[in-house]
Image (cartoon, rainbow, N blue to C red):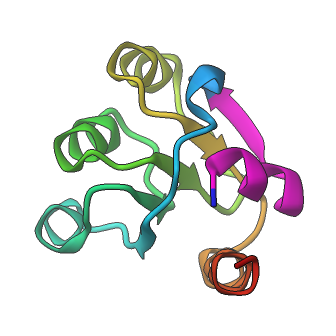
């Protein structure tokens, strides 16, 4: 499944790196503690978080995530978006709570095959 498919199915909004929305998603990780995400997420994951600061891009780049989805209507600032664009990490936003969004993504990934 691709980021683009998730965006279309769930009505999400991409904030940067539209050219990378064809990225394949191998799995996912949900969490807000950066050290936890660094230690446990995997390459190709879509990362679902409430965090919006600059360091989320560094973690996603280090772990080679397919993209970041920010939940609960939060929005990254200009510096975060600029760094994400430079690193090629798509940032997507959703108004949904994290628990609900993760459930929907899981359902899409495991029933779209």
x, y (%) of residue 66?
44, 47
Corner quadrant of residue 61 = top left
- Measured as percent of width and height from the top left, residue 4 is found at 72, 45
Q: Is residue 9 magenta?
A: yes
Q: Across the whole image, how many numbered discs are drawn on residues?
A: 0
- In magenta segment, residue 111: no
In this rendering, position of residue 25 left or right of residue 65 = right
Residue beneath the point at 43% across and 32% down:
89
| Quadrant for the C terminus in the image | bottom right
Percent position (x, y) of residue 5? Answer: 76, 53
Viewer-nearest residue: 66 or 50: 66
Residue at image location 36% in from the left, 13% down from the top: 86
Q: Where does the N terminus fall, quadrant-wise?
A: bottom right
Identify the image quadrant of residue 71. Answer: bottom right
85 or 78, which lies in front?
85
Please state which of residues 11 and 99 is positioned toward the viewer in this rendering: 11
The residue lying toward the viewer, choosing from 103 and 109, is 109
Above-or-below relation of 37 to 103? above
Position of 19 relative to 64 (above/below): above
Above or below 22: residue 48:
below
Residue 107 as seen in the image, left or right of residue 85: right
Q: Position of residue 26 (x, y in %)?
A: 43, 65
Tell me the quarter of the picture where residue 82 sits. top left
Residue bounds of the magenta highlight? 2-15
Asked if 78 appears above or below 80 in the picture, the reply is above
Which residue is at 55% across, 29% downward? Answer: 20
């Amino acid at each position: 499944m691709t980021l683009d498919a998730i965006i279309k199915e769930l009505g999400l909004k991409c904030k940067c790196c539209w050219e990378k929305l064809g990225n394949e998603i191998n799995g996912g990780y949900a969490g807000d503690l950066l050290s936890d995400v660094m230690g446990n997420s995997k390459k190709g994951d879509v990362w679902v978080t409430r965090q919006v600061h600059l360091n989320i891009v560094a973690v996603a780049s280090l772990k080679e995530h397919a993209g970041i989805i920010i939940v609960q209507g939060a929005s990254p600032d200009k510096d975060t978006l600029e760094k994400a664009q430079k690193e090629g990490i798509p940032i997507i936003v959703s108004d949904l709570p994290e628990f609900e969004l993760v459930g929907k993504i899981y359902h899409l990934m495991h029933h779209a095959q």
